Amino acid sequence: MGLSALERPPGAPTEVTTRDRVIIGGRRLEDLFADVMTGRLTYESNLLRILCRRTLDADLADLAAPMLIGLATGQADGRDLACVRLSASTHAPFEQAILPFLHFGERFAQTMKWLRFGHCRAVPTVPAGAELARRLRAMLKEARPSSPYLSTLDACTSLTAEHVAAAYLLECGLRPDDAPFVKIAARLPVAGAVFLDELGQRPNRFNGIDKNGENRSANALAAVGLELLEARSNFAAAMIRLALGRSVDNLEAVPINAALVAGAEYGGSSASSLMMRMICDDGVSAADAMQAMIATFGCYHLGALKGSAAIIASVAGGTCIDEAIVRHGIVDPSGRIRVIGFGHRFQRRDPRAVLLLDLCRKCYPGRFVDAAAQLDEELGARRIGYINMDGIGAAMGLQGGMASDIAPLVTLVARTPGICNALRQATPLPGDCKLRARIGLV
Protein backbone atom coordinates (compact mmCIF):
# COMPACT_ATOMS: atom_id res chain seq x y z
CA MET A 1 0.00 0.00 0.00
CA GLY A 2 1.49 3.34 -1.00
CA LEU A 3 1.05 6.66 0.74
CA SER A 4 -1.83 7.62 -1.53
CA ALA A 5 -3.79 4.74 -0.06
CA LEU A 6 -3.61 5.98 3.51
CA GLU A 7 -7.05 6.78 4.82
CA ARG A 8 -7.17 10.16 6.48
CA PRO A 9 -9.84 11.17 8.98
CA PRO A 10 -11.99 14.21 8.20
CA GLY A 11 -10.10 17.40 8.86
CA ALA A 12 -6.69 15.71 8.86
CA PRO A 13 -3.92 17.49 6.95
CA THR A 14 -3.54 16.29 3.39
CA GLU A 15 -0.10 17.72 2.60
CA VAL A 16 2.25 14.75 2.82
CA THR A 17 4.95 15.87 0.43
CA THR A 18 8.24 17.48 1.39
CA ARG A 19 8.86 18.60 -2.22
CA ASP A 20 12.04 16.49 -2.10
CA ARG A 21 13.45 18.61 0.74
CA VAL A 22 13.75 15.90 3.38
CA ILE A 23 16.47 13.43 2.42
CA ILE A 24 17.40 10.70 4.91
CA GLY A 25 20.37 8.55 4.02
CA GLY A 26 20.22 9.73 0.41
CA ARG A 27 16.51 8.94 -0.10
CA ARG A 28 13.38 11.08 -0.10
CA LEU A 29 11.17 10.82 2.97
CA GLU A 30 8.16 9.97 0.77
CA ASP A 31 10.02 7.02 -0.75
CA LEU A 32 11.09 5.78 2.67
CA PHE A 33 7.52 5.87 3.96
CA ALA A 34 6.18 4.11 0.90
CA ASP A 35 8.67 1.30 1.48
CA VAL A 36 7.85 1.14 5.21
CA MET A 37 4.14 0.80 4.48
CA THR A 38 4.68 -2.01 2.01
CA GLY A 39 7.07 -3.85 4.32
CA ARG A 40 10.11 -3.34 2.08
CA LEU A 41 11.99 -1.18 4.61
CA THR A 42 12.71 -1.61 8.31
CA TYR A 43 14.75 0.43 10.75
CA GLU A 44 17.53 -2.16 10.84
CA SER A 45 17.91 -2.40 7.06
CA ASN A 46 17.86 1.40 6.77
CA LEU A 47 20.45 1.66 9.58
CA LEU A 48 22.85 -0.67 7.78
CA ARG A 49 22.15 0.91 4.39
CA ILE A 50 23.23 4.30 5.77
CA LEU A 51 26.22 2.96 7.70
CA CYS A 52 27.45 0.67 4.92
CA ARG A 53 26.67 3.27 2.23
CA ARG A 54 24.94 0.73 0.03
CA THR A 55 21.76 -1.32 -0.16
CA LEU A 56 22.42 -4.78 1.26
CA ASP A 57 21.96 -7.92 -0.79
CA ALA A 58 18.66 -9.64 0.01
CA ASP A 59 20.28 -12.53 1.89
CA LEU A 60 22.19 -10.14 4.17
CA ALA A 61 19.23 -7.77 4.60
CA ASP A 62 17.13 -10.68 5.91
CA LEU A 63 19.67 -11.20 8.70
CA ALA A 64 19.72 -7.58 9.89
CA ALA A 65 17.00 -8.00 12.53
CA PRO A 66 18.28 -11.33 13.96
CA MET A 67 21.81 -9.94 14.26
CA LEU A 68 20.64 -6.77 16.04
CA ILE A 69 18.57 -8.94 18.37
CA GLY A 70 21.70 -11.00 19.02
CA LEU A 71 23.69 -7.86 19.83
CA ALA A 72 20.93 -6.69 22.18
CA THR A 73 20.51 -9.91 24.12
CA GLY A 74 23.55 -12.16 23.65
CA GLN A 75 26.15 -10.32 25.72
CA ALA A 76 27.23 -12.29 28.80
CA ASP A 77 29.09 -9.34 30.35
CA GLY A 78 26.49 -7.00 31.83
CA ARG A 79 28.76 -4.18 32.99
CA ASP A 80 27.22 -1.72 30.53
CA LEU A 81 23.77 -2.34 32.02
CA ALA A 82 25.20 -2.19 35.55
CA CYS A 83 26.33 1.38 34.78
CA VAL A 84 22.78 2.27 33.76
CA ARG A 85 21.38 0.64 36.89
CA LEU A 86 23.77 2.54 39.14
CA SER A 87 22.81 5.87 37.58
CA ALA A 88 19.10 5.01 37.79
CA SER A 89 19.57 4.21 41.47
CA THR A 90 20.50 7.85 42.04
CA HIS A 91 17.50 8.96 39.93
CA ALA A 92 19.63 10.50 37.20
CA PRO A 93 17.67 11.20 33.98
CA PHE A 94 17.84 8.43 31.38
CA GLU A 95 19.94 10.49 28.98
CA GLN A 96 22.56 10.97 31.71
CA ALA A 97 22.35 7.38 32.92
CA ILE A 98 23.50 6.03 29.57
CA LEU A 99 26.63 8.18 29.25
CA PRO A 100 29.02 5.53 30.73
CA PHE A 101 27.03 2.82 28.93
CA LEU A 102 27.94 4.30 25.54
CA HIS A 103 31.65 3.59 25.94
CA PHE A 104 31.06 -0.14 26.32
CA GLY A 105 29.78 -0.19 22.74
CA GLU A 106 33.26 0.68 21.52
CA ARG A 107 34.59 -2.74 22.55
CA PHE A 108 32.54 -4.19 19.71
CA ALA A 109 34.78 -2.39 17.20
CA GLN A 110 37.77 -4.24 18.62
CA THR A 111 35.93 -7.56 18.26
CA MET A 112 35.40 -6.81 14.57
CA LYS A 113 39.04 -5.84 14.07
CA TRP A 114 40.26 -9.10 15.63
CA LEU A 115 37.84 -11.12 13.55
CA ARG A 116 38.90 -9.41 10.37
CA PHE A 117 42.45 -10.67 10.96
CA GLY A 118 41.36 -14.19 11.84
CA HIS A 119 41.21 -13.94 15.63
CA CYS A 120 38.16 -14.72 17.77
CA ARG A 121 38.77 -14.40 21.51
CA ALA A 122 36.69 -16.88 23.52
CA VAL A 123 34.28 -15.23 25.96
CA PRO A 124 32.49 -17.23 28.69
CA THR A 125 28.78 -17.18 28.04
CA VAL A 126 25.54 -18.51 29.52
CA PRO A 127 23.61 -21.51 28.10
CA ALA A 128 20.94 -19.44 26.35
CA GLY A 129 23.64 -17.13 24.98
CA ALA A 130 25.55 -20.08 23.52
CA GLU A 131 22.37 -21.36 21.84
CA LEU A 132 21.63 -17.88 20.48
CA ALA A 133 25.14 -17.70 18.99
CA ARG A 134 24.75 -21.16 17.45
CA ARG A 135 21.48 -20.23 15.74
CA LEU A 136 22.84 -16.95 14.42
CA ARG A 137 25.92 -18.72 13.09
CA ALA A 138 23.68 -21.25 11.28
CA MET A 139 21.75 -18.34 9.70
CA LEU A 140 24.99 -16.70 8.54
CA LYS A 141 26.29 -19.99 7.11
CA GLU A 142 23.07 -20.53 5.18
CA ALA A 143 23.20 -17.02 3.74
CA ARG A 144 26.94 -16.89 3.07
CA PRO A 145 28.42 -20.42 3.13
CA SER A 146 31.68 -19.19 1.63
CA SER A 147 32.27 -16.48 4.25
CA PRO A 148 35.92 -16.46 5.33
CA TYR A 149 34.86 -15.68 8.90
CA LEU A 150 32.99 -18.96 9.48
CA SER A 151 36.17 -20.97 10.01
CA THR A 152 37.36 -18.43 12.57
CA LEU A 153 34.04 -18.68 14.41
CA ASP A 154 34.27 -22.49 14.38
CA ALA A 155 37.69 -22.33 16.02
CA CYS A 156 36.38 -20.24 18.93
CA THR A 157 35.86 -22.40 22.02
CA SER A 158 33.19 -20.14 23.50
CA LEU A 159 31.18 -18.33 20.86
CA THR A 160 28.85 -15.41 21.59
CA ALA A 161 26.21 -13.64 19.53
CA GLU A 162 28.56 -10.64 19.36
CA HIS A 163 31.15 -12.71 17.48
CA VAL A 164 28.59 -13.84 14.90
CA ALA A 165 27.15 -10.33 14.53
CA ALA A 166 30.68 -9.01 13.99
CA ALA A 167 31.21 -11.53 11.18
CA TYR A 168 27.87 -10.55 9.66
CA LEU A 169 28.68 -6.84 9.70
CA LEU A 170 32.06 -7.49 8.10
CA GLU A 171 30.23 -9.39 5.35
CA CYS A 172 28.01 -6.33 4.92
CA GLY A 173 31.10 -4.16 4.43
CA LEU A 174 30.72 -2.11 7.61
CA ARG A 175 33.83 -0.39 8.88
CA PRO A 176 34.81 -1.50 12.41
CA ASP A 177 34.98 2.15 13.50
CA ASP A 178 31.26 2.50 12.72
CA ALA A 179 30.30 -0.76 14.46
CA PRO A 180 29.77 0.81 17.92
CA PHE A 181 26.78 2.71 16.54
CA VAL A 182 25.10 -0.58 15.64
CA LYS A 183 25.85 -2.05 19.07
CA ILE A 184 24.58 1.04 20.87
CA ALA A 185 21.33 1.16 18.89
CA ALA A 186 20.74 -2.57 19.49
CA ARG A 187 21.46 -2.45 23.22
CA LEU A 188 19.60 0.77 24.10
CA PRO A 189 16.14 -0.84 24.57
CA VAL A 190 17.58 -3.21 27.19
CA ALA A 191 19.20 -0.22 28.89
CA GLY A 192 15.76 1.42 29.02
CA ALA A 193 14.25 -1.64 30.69
CA VAL A 194 17.04 -1.79 33.28
CA PHE A 195 16.64 1.93 33.97
CA LEU A 196 12.89 1.61 34.61
CA ASP A 197 13.38 -1.48 36.77
CA GLU A 198 15.89 0.25 39.03
CA LEU A 199 13.81 3.44 39.16
CA GLY A 200 11.06 1.39 40.82
CA GLN A 201 13.39 0.22 43.60
CA ARG A 202 14.53 1.95 46.77
CA PRO A 203 16.66 4.98 45.82
CA ASN A 204 20.44 4.64 46.03
CA ARG A 205 20.25 0.95 46.92
CA PHE A 206 22.47 -0.34 44.10
CA ASN A 207 26.13 -0.42 45.08
CA GLY A 208 27.79 -3.16 43.05
CA ILE A 209 27.47 -6.14 40.73
CA ASP A 210 26.18 -9.47 42.00
CA LYS A 211 27.98 -11.95 39.75
CA ASN A 212 25.41 -14.69 40.19
CA GLY A 213 22.52 -12.35 39.65
CA GLU A 214 24.26 -10.97 36.59
CA ASN A 215 24.55 -14.45 35.05
CA ARG A 216 20.90 -15.25 35.73
CA SER A 217 19.90 -11.95 34.19
CA ALA A 218 22.13 -12.57 31.15
CA ASN A 219 20.64 -16.02 30.63
CA ALA A 220 17.08 -14.69 30.89
CA LEU A 221 17.88 -11.90 28.42
CA ALA A 222 19.40 -14.34 25.93
CA ALA A 223 16.28 -16.52 26.30
CA VAL A 224 14.20 -13.50 25.27
CA GLY A 225 16.49 -13.14 22.25
CA LEU A 226 15.73 -16.75 21.29
CA GLU A 227 11.98 -16.02 21.58
CA LEU A 228 12.35 -13.03 19.29
CA LEU A 229 14.23 -15.13 16.74
CA GLU A 230 11.47 -17.74 16.83
CA ALA A 231 8.86 -15.03 16.27
CA ARG A 232 10.91 -13.57 13.38
CA SER A 233 10.58 -10.15 14.97
CA ASN A 234 11.90 -7.04 13.29
CA PHE A 235 13.82 -4.57 15.42
CA ALA A 236 10.83 -2.30 16.11
CA ALA A 237 8.90 -5.24 17.59
CA ALA A 238 12.02 -6.38 19.45
CA MET A 239 12.49 -2.90 20.92
CA ILE A 240 8.99 -2.94 22.40
CA ARG A 241 9.54 -6.43 23.85
CA LEU A 242 12.94 -5.58 25.33
CA ALA A 243 12.09 -2.13 26.68
CA LEU A 244 8.50 -2.70 27.80
CA GLY A 245 8.25 -6.48 28.21
CA ARG A 246 5.23 -6.55 25.89
CA SER A 247 5.12 -8.79 22.83
CA VAL A 248 3.82 -7.39 19.54
CA ASP A 249 4.01 -8.75 16.02
CA ASN A 250 5.69 -6.99 13.11
CA LEU A 251 2.39 -5.65 11.80
CA GLU A 252 1.56 -3.94 15.10
CA ALA A 253 5.05 -2.46 15.14
CA VAL A 254 4.67 -0.72 11.74
CA PRO A 255 4.10 2.78 13.26
CA ILE A 256 7.11 2.36 15.60
CA ASN A 257 9.22 1.19 12.67
CA ALA A 258 8.09 4.21 10.64
CA ALA A 259 8.99 6.58 13.48
CA LEU A 260 12.46 5.04 13.83
CA VAL A 261 13.08 5.38 10.08
CA ALA A 262 11.76 8.95 9.85
CA GLY A 263 13.51 10.06 13.04
CA ALA A 264 17.02 9.91 11.57
CA GLU A 265 18.54 13.35 11.21
CA TYR A 266 18.48 15.05 7.85
CA GLY A 267 20.51 18.06 6.81
CA GLY A 268 23.28 19.71 8.77
CA SER A 269 21.39 22.39 10.67
CA SER A 270 20.06 20.35 13.59
CA ALA A 271 21.57 20.88 17.02
CA SER A 272 23.26 17.50 17.22
CA SER A 273 24.69 17.70 13.68
CA LEU A 274 26.19 21.07 14.53
CA MET A 275 27.64 19.56 17.69
CA MET A 276 29.34 16.91 15.56
CA ARG A 277 31.13 19.66 13.66
CA MET A 278 32.14 21.49 16.83
CA ILE A 279 33.66 18.51 18.60
CA CYS A 280 35.11 16.77 15.56
CA ASP A 281 38.81 16.01 15.55
CA ASP A 282 40.88 12.96 14.74
CA GLY A 283 40.20 11.35 18.11
CA VAL A 284 36.41 11.55 18.32
CA SER A 285 34.81 8.14 18.91
CA ALA A 286 31.28 6.79 18.53
CA ALA A 287 30.63 7.31 22.23
CA ASP A 288 31.85 10.92 21.96
CA ALA A 289 29.51 11.46 19.02
CA MET A 290 26.51 10.07 20.89
CA GLN A 291 27.38 12.12 23.96
CA ALA A 292 27.52 15.23 21.80
CA MET A 293 23.99 14.49 20.63
CA ILE A 294 22.82 14.01 24.21
CA ALA A 295 24.45 17.32 25.15
CA THR A 296 21.93 19.02 22.86
CA PHE A 297 18.93 17.50 24.62
CA GLY A 298 16.59 20.08 26.06
CA CYS A 299 13.05 21.36 26.00
CA TYR A 300 13.22 22.38 22.32
CA HIS A 301 15.82 20.13 20.67
CA LEU A 302 15.76 16.35 20.57
CA GLY A 303 14.92 15.34 24.12
CA ALA A 304 11.54 17.03 24.19
CA LEU A 305 9.57 13.80 24.23
CA LYS A 306 9.23 13.82 28.01
CA GLY A 307 7.76 17.34 28.00
CA SER A 308 5.54 16.52 25.04
CA ALA A 309 4.25 13.44 26.83
CA ALA A 310 3.16 15.59 29.78
CA ILE A 311 0.74 17.80 27.84
CA ILE A 312 -0.55 14.95 25.64
CA ALA A 313 -1.25 12.80 28.71
CA SER A 314 -2.94 15.75 30.38
CA VAL A 315 -5.34 16.30 27.47
CA ALA A 316 -5.92 12.56 27.11
CA GLY A 317 -6.86 12.52 30.79
CA GLY A 318 -9.62 15.06 30.26
CA THR A 319 -7.88 18.38 30.85
CA CYS A 320 -9.15 21.11 28.54
CA ILE A 321 -6.59 22.48 26.10
CA ASP A 322 -6.57 26.00 27.61
CA GLU A 323 -5.73 24.61 31.05
CA ALA A 324 -3.15 22.24 29.56
CA ILE A 325 -1.40 25.17 27.86
CA VAL A 326 -1.31 27.08 31.15
CA ARG A 327 0.19 24.05 32.93
CA HIS A 328 2.69 22.95 30.31
CA GLY A 329 3.27 25.90 28.00
CA ILE A 330 6.41 28.03 28.03
CA VAL A 331 6.44 31.79 27.55
CA ASP A 332 9.60 32.94 25.79
CA PRO A 333 11.23 36.38 26.36
CA SER A 334 9.22 37.88 23.50
CA GLY A 335 5.98 36.84 25.22
CA ARG A 336 5.16 34.13 22.71
CA ILE A 337 3.59 30.93 24.06
CA ARG A 338 5.41 27.74 23.09
CA VAL A 339 4.34 24.16 23.73
CA ILE A 340 6.95 21.42 23.71
CA GLY A 341 6.34 18.96 20.88
CA PHE A 342 4.50 21.47 18.70
CA GLY A 343 6.04 23.85 16.18
CA HIS A 344 9.15 23.69 14.02
CA ARG A 345 12.04 26.08 13.51
CA PHE A 346 11.99 26.05 9.72
CA GLN A 347 8.71 24.53 8.58
CA ARG A 348 5.10 25.40 9.19
CA ARG A 349 4.38 21.67 9.36
CA ASP A 350 6.95 18.97 9.95
CA PRO A 351 6.23 16.58 7.05
CA ARG A 352 7.54 13.60 9.02
CA ALA A 353 5.05 14.27 11.80
CA VAL A 354 2.20 14.75 9.29
CA LEU A 355 2.88 11.32 7.82
CA LEU A 356 3.26 9.65 11.21
CA LEU A 357 0.12 11.22 12.69
CA ASP A 358 -1.91 10.02 9.71
CA LEU A 359 -0.40 6.55 10.08
CA CYS A 360 -1.08 6.40 13.82
CA ARG A 361 -4.70 7.44 13.49
CA LYS A 362 -5.20 4.59 11.06
CA CYS A 363 -2.97 1.83 12.46
CA TYR A 364 -2.31 2.77 16.09
CA PRO A 365 -5.51 4.40 17.40
CA GLY A 366 -6.09 5.29 21.02
CA ARG A 367 -6.74 8.14 23.41
CA PHE A 368 -3.16 9.46 23.37
CA VAL A 369 -3.01 9.58 19.59
CA ASP A 370 -6.44 11.23 19.58
CA ALA A 371 -5.19 13.81 22.12
CA ALA A 372 -2.13 14.51 19.96
CA ALA A 373 -4.34 15.00 16.91
CA GLN A 374 -6.63 17.33 18.90
CA LEU A 375 -3.66 19.38 20.08
CA ASP A 376 -2.23 19.46 16.56
CA GLU A 377 -5.44 20.93 15.19
CA GLU A 378 -6.05 23.39 18.03
CA LEU A 379 -2.46 24.62 18.55
CA GLY A 380 -1.99 24.89 14.79
CA ALA A 381 -5.10 27.03 14.51
CA ARG A 382 -3.81 29.26 17.32
CA ARG A 383 -0.46 29.60 15.53
CA ILE A 384 1.38 28.08 18.46
CA GLY A 385 2.55 25.30 16.17
CA TYR A 386 1.57 22.00 14.59
CA ILE A 387 2.81 18.70 15.99
CA ASN A 388 6.46 17.85 15.35
CA MET A 389 8.53 14.65 15.66
CA ASP A 390 8.87 14.99 19.42
CA GLY A 391 5.12 15.37 19.82
CA ILE A 392 4.19 12.38 17.68
CA GLY A 393 6.98 10.32 19.22
CA ALA A 394 5.64 11.08 22.70
CA ALA A 395 2.09 10.17 21.65
CA MET A 396 3.25 6.85 20.22
CA GLY A 397 5.27 6.10 23.34
CA LEU A 398 2.31 6.82 25.61
CA GLN A 399 -0.02 4.80 23.40
CA GLY A 400 2.38 1.86 23.63
CA GLY A 401 2.69 2.09 27.41
CA MET A 402 6.19 3.59 27.51
CA ALA A 403 6.97 5.52 30.69
CA SER A 404 7.95 9.12 30.05
CA ASP A 405 11.21 8.51 31.96
CA ILE A 406 12.61 6.56 28.98
CA ALA A 407 10.86 8.52 26.24
CA PRO A 408 14.26 9.76 24.90
CA LEU A 409 14.96 6.13 23.96
CA VAL A 410 12.95 6.61 20.76
CA THR A 411 15.04 9.62 19.76
CA LEU A 412 18.33 7.95 20.63
CA VAL A 413 17.65 4.83 18.57
CA ALA A 414 16.15 6.75 15.63
CA ARG A 415 18.97 9.27 15.36
CA THR A 416 21.87 6.82 15.64
CA PRO A 417 22.40 6.37 11.86
CA GLY A 418 22.22 10.13 11.33
CA ILE A 419 24.77 10.77 14.07
CA CYS A 420 27.16 8.25 12.52
CA ASN A 421 26.69 9.88 9.13
CA ALA A 422 27.28 13.37 10.53
CA LEU A 423 30.46 12.26 12.27
CA ARG A 424 31.85 10.67 9.10
CA GLN A 425 31.13 13.78 7.06
CA ALA A 426 32.51 16.21 9.63
CA THR A 427 35.97 17.67 9.26
CA PRO A 428 38.10 19.46 11.88
CA LEU A 429 37.39 23.16 12.02
CA PRO A 430 40.16 25.74 11.59
CA GLY A 431 41.15 28.24 14.24
CA ASP A 432 38.13 30.48 13.70
CA CYS A 433 35.77 27.77 14.98
CA LYS A 434 34.12 30.11 17.52
CA LEU A 435 33.14 32.53 14.78
CA ARG A 436 32.05 29.72 12.47
CA ALA A 437 29.96 28.14 15.22
CA ARG A 438 28.29 31.47 15.92
CA ILE A 439 27.26 31.90 12.28
CA GLY A 440 26.05 28.35 11.83
CA LEU A 441 29.27 26.60 10.85
CA VAL A 442 29.03 27.58 7.21
Image: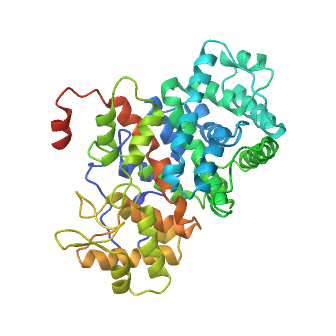
In this orientation, which residue lies closer to the viewer: 111 or 260?
Answer: 111
In this orientation, which residue lies closer to the viewer: 13 or 318?
Answer: 318
- Where is residue 21? Give x, y as percent: 26, 49
Judge left or right: residue 42 versus residue 273.
right
Judge left or right: residue 124 versus residue 353.
right
Q: Is residue 392 above or below residue 370?
A: above
Quarter of the picture holding the C terminus? top left
- Where is residue 34? Give x, y as percent: 43, 52
The outermost residue toward the top is: 117
Q: Is residue 21 visible?
A: yes
- Where is residue 100? Give x, y as percent: 54, 41
Q: Is residue 351 above or below residue 387?
A: above
The residue lying at 73 percent from left, 29 percent from top is 137
The residue lying at 64 percent from left, 55 percent from top is 193
The outermost residue toward the right is: 127
Tell me where residue 280 sits by quadrant.
Answer: top left
How many marks can you see? 0
The residue lying at 20 percent from left, 26 percent from top is 430
* Colouring of the image: rainbow
Q: Is residue 35 visible?
A: no
Judge left or right: residue 30 versus residue 233.
left
In this orientation, which residue lies closer to the viewer: 380 or 294?
Answer: 294
The residue lying at 39 percent from left, 53 percent from top is 297
